Image (cartoon, rainbow, N blue to C red):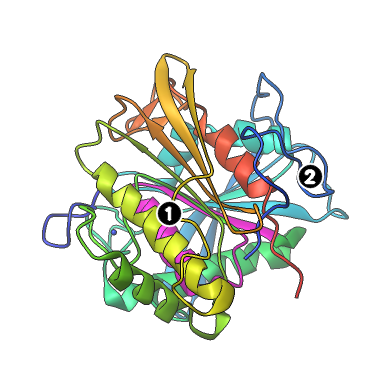
């Protein structure tokens, strides 16, 4: 859910080769990114921990798959919840434990404190929480570092995702720590330092993103999804997210805004799954490497699709976002310097 109305309604290379149908690519040598048609039960451990650092204290829930092996580096996915939602509720809504069990990845769900925001929102919209090494970005990175110290985590495969206000916070994390997160997924999120109506100019949003990235600037592959019937986060805001990140890619590849990175998708597929139609667009650079993907789900409101029907802001209809975001993450490890 979004933040209150006073703060708005909520907050280069990636892969190789020309795009095939989404999902018809592998992980670049780490095994298939495809998951089984039937996801297994979440048979691992779902554990609550508490992080305490200079920027504050937060609980977080960590899913550890039953196949976890201490001598094997595992990918880590960070999932950020929305307003009026808890970490446990997001985990249940997304059923990401089943994805993690099938893929053998760790998943962490940081839990916002009501003392930090009375609506339970991560403060993605506040300037104090939009900068590296301070505020909630530093706190969330602290949780990631704590997990990396206590568990076997692959530093090249740490990913960031979220829903609603959590999606907007995920974009803040990718903007302020582009060197730490290999890829980012935003479902019903708003542009970095932008509003949820998609009204700002693309140039303004791009400059904000590049400024936040600073000396660590690199293009972070992005997966964006939204529903056409979302009355809380405008589909125009999701279009603005794509334009912001592709605009940054255009500048980062050769230092100039010269359309060297196309703004139009290289491929658009019209698909249907679990009762909902959707479009799947793939964006590439001039070499054909995937930079971004976007799902637009017809008739979907402000809800995670392909998840649990028992939770708020979630429906089992439509494409399985857990499966789709994992596939995208798996295809985009962080390049070794």
- Pick out the residue farthest to the bottom: 215
Examine the rendered structure and indicate whether residue 303 appears above or below residue 141.
Answer: above
> Label 2 to label 1, Cα distance in Å?
23 Å
Examine the rendered structure and indicate whether residue 256 appears above or below residue 166.
Answer: below
Q: Which residue is mark 1?
A: 111
Q: Where is residue 209 drawn, in percent x and y?
A: 40, 72
Name the side, left or right, on which 292 lies relative to 336: left
Q: Which residues are magenta?
A: 157-182
Q: Where is residue 333 drawn, in percent x and y?
A: 70, 57
The mark nearer the N terminus, 2 or 1, is: 2
Question: Quick one: 301 or 73, which is closer to the camera?
Answer: 301
Q: Which residue is mark 2?
A: 68
Q: Residue at image x 64%, y 40%?
A: 327
- Pick out the residue farthest to the right: 71
Residue 254 painted magenta? no
Question: Quick one: 228 or 148, which is closer to the camera?
Answer: 228
- The quarter of the picture where the N terminus appears is top left
């Amino acid at each position: 859910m979004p933040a209150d109305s006073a703060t708005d309604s909520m907050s280069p290379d990636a892969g190789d080769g020309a795009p095939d149908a989404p999902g018809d690519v592998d992980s670049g040598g780490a095994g298939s990114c495809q998951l089984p048609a039937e996801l297994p039960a979440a048979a691992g451990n779902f554990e609550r921990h508490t992080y305490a650092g200079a920027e504050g204290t937060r609980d977080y829930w960590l899913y550890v798959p039953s196949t976890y092996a201490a001598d094997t580096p595992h990918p880590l996915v960070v999932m950020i919840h929305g307003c009026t939602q808890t970490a446990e509720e997001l985990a249940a809504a997304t059923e990401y434990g089943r994805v993690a069990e099938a893929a053998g990845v760790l998943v962490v769900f940081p839990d916002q404190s009501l003392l930090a925001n009375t609506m339970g929102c991560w403060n993605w919209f506040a300037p104090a929480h939009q900068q590296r090494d301070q505020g909630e970005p530093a706190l969330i990175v602290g949780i990631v570092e704590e997990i990396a110290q206590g568990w076997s985590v692959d530093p090249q495969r740490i990913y960031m995702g979220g829903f609603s206000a959590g999606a907007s916070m995920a974009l803040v994390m990718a903007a302020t720590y582009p060197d730490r997160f290999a890829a980012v997924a935003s479902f019903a999120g708003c542009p970095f330092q932008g509003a949820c109506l998609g009204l700002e100019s693309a140039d303004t949003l791009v400059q904000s993103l590049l400024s936040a990235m600073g000396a660590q600037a690199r293009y972070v592959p992005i997966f964006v999804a939204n529903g056409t019937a979302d009355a809380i986060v405008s589909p125009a805001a999701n279009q603005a997210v794509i334009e912001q990140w592709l605009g940054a890619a255009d500048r980062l590849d050769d230092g100039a805004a010269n359309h060297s990175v196309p703004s139009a998708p290289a491929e658009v597929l019209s698909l249907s799954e679990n009762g909902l139609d959707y479009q799947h667009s793939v964006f590439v650079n001039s070499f054909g490497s995937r930079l971004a993907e976007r799902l637009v789900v017809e008739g979907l409101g402000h809800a995670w699709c392909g998840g649990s029907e028992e939770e708020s802001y979630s429906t089992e209809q439509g494409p399985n976002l857990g499966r789709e975001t994992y596939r995208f993450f798996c295809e985009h490890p962080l390049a070794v310097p």
